[in-house]
Amino acid sequence: MKKVFLNDSEIPTRWYNVLADLPSPMSPPLHPATGQPVGPDDLAPVFPMNLIEQEVSTERWIDIPEAVLDKYLLWRPSPLCRAENFEKLLDAPVKIFYKNEGVSPPGSHKPNTAVAQAYYNKAFGVKRLSTETGAGQWGSALSMACQMFGLECRVFMVKVSYQQKPFRGLMMAVWGANCIPSPSDQTHAGRKILSEHPDSPGSLGIAISEAIEDAVGDPDARYSLGSVLNHVLLHQTVIGLEAQKQLKKVGIYPDVVIGCAGGGSNFGGLCLPFVRDKINGKEISVVAAEPTSCPTMTKGPYAYDFGDTAQTTPLLAMYTLGHDFVPAPIHAGGLRYHGMAPIISHLVKEQIVEPRAYDQIQTFEAGINWARSEGFIPAPETNHAIAAVVDEAQRAREEGKEKVILFNWSGHGVVDLAAYDAYLSGKLIKYEMPEEDITRALKAIEGLPKP
Ligand SMILES: *Cc1c(COP(=O)(O)O)cnc(C)c1O
């Protein structure tokens, strides 16, 4: 068996909400001015009310609207594949399965939530969405989704990526969106950064500030975030729910579930349905892989922090490297966000999810070995998950234990080959975030409430 497919009629029709099953309550988002939990009205200028309701819902199952299923069916259910060639290469007692989320039109898991968010904004009467993007995966996914539901789309793209990856900007243009390098002169937040640091390469935190400011200034516009928030992780659970059906068909249950984690959405999407099983007593490891150059969960404190650089968002309880964090320019592997989804952070704190950090040399090595055995070229982000699979296979060999590994192949790297160029031409170095950066991070969150 190399692949397990589901028929169109077998696509999950509900998303899974882990908030219904958490063993302990999460710390709520706080209003930075009052220190009180934010209410739905505080968020109304930023998000449509139907998504705010999902953000705070504790219902275990939420129906996927027909119109969203109709779009999902363009590429979903995604195949569950067995990586037998990679298994041979690793020569360890493991079976490796992966969900191939690279089969979507923009090439990643991101349209699972982009399509849902465009649908709910349209239903609420919104005319335009504003967002940020790092490598461009999210911007292209939202551009496609906005086009499908007749919304305008404006994307603030981290400047260094905009320059390095012109093809992502072109994809957004094909899908009818307007892509602007950030920091830009179109917002107060952008102009402030430019006046202090004219050569700023940009960061996700800055781009988020610009996109929020842009959306809040236009009553017909709302902001859209591609990761981190509860409703985003909710939409992504279609991945894990499909995987559970597929594995059931072949009578297999995994010992380890793995995903790479930037903001936590593809990781949560695959893993949260399995986290539910773990909470209910299943013995299973759930591993989140991150870069050593942006080691949010393995080095950062669990604290209240802003989601963006300009401190416009509510305070989120999460692992964080500080809202002023800008990853080292040498870092090529993506997963650059300073924080981590509050849901994933909570699960790490509760020791239900185990975070591990991998160096970029290790991740590209794993990704190249994957491409040379399994064919598909992974996105640099996905390589972190593959590095964790290699690590897990080595552990299984050392322990002499047979293991079934399931991981999320979050996307392909066909529009992201510059990072491979850097690796193949020997320009990448092993890089760990310096310890001084922890001091800076702690300073950034000084004086904020503690979860
Ligand atoms: C955006 C992206 C990620 C990281 O984002 P998460 O929200 O952590 O999933 C990982 N892989 C791919 C292919 C991406 O496009």
Image (cartoon, helix red, strand yellow):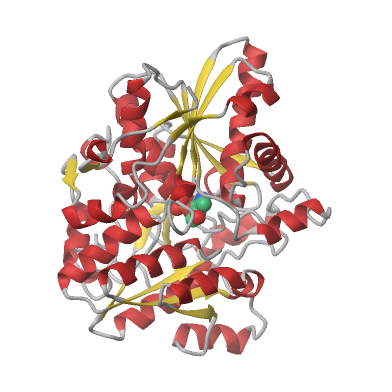
Residue 4 shows in the view? yes
Residue depicted at x 69% and y 44%: 359
Q: Is residue 341 left or right of residue 389?
A: left
Give the image location of residue 157, x and y in percent.
52, 73
Q: Is residue 57 above or below residue 313?
A: above
Q: Is residue 170 left or right of residue 221?
A: right
178 or 431, which lies in front? 178
Residue 319 shows in the view? no
Q: Is residue 323 above or below residue 429?
A: below
Q: Is residue 304 above or below residue 346?
A: below
190 or 438, which lies in front? 190
Residue depicted at x 31% and y 43%: 238
The quadrant in which residue 344 appears is top left
Residue depicted at x 21% and y 64%: 120
Give the image location of residue 377, x and y in percent.
62, 47
Q: Is residue 195 left or right of residue 250?
A: right
| Furthest residue in direction top, as rendered | 400
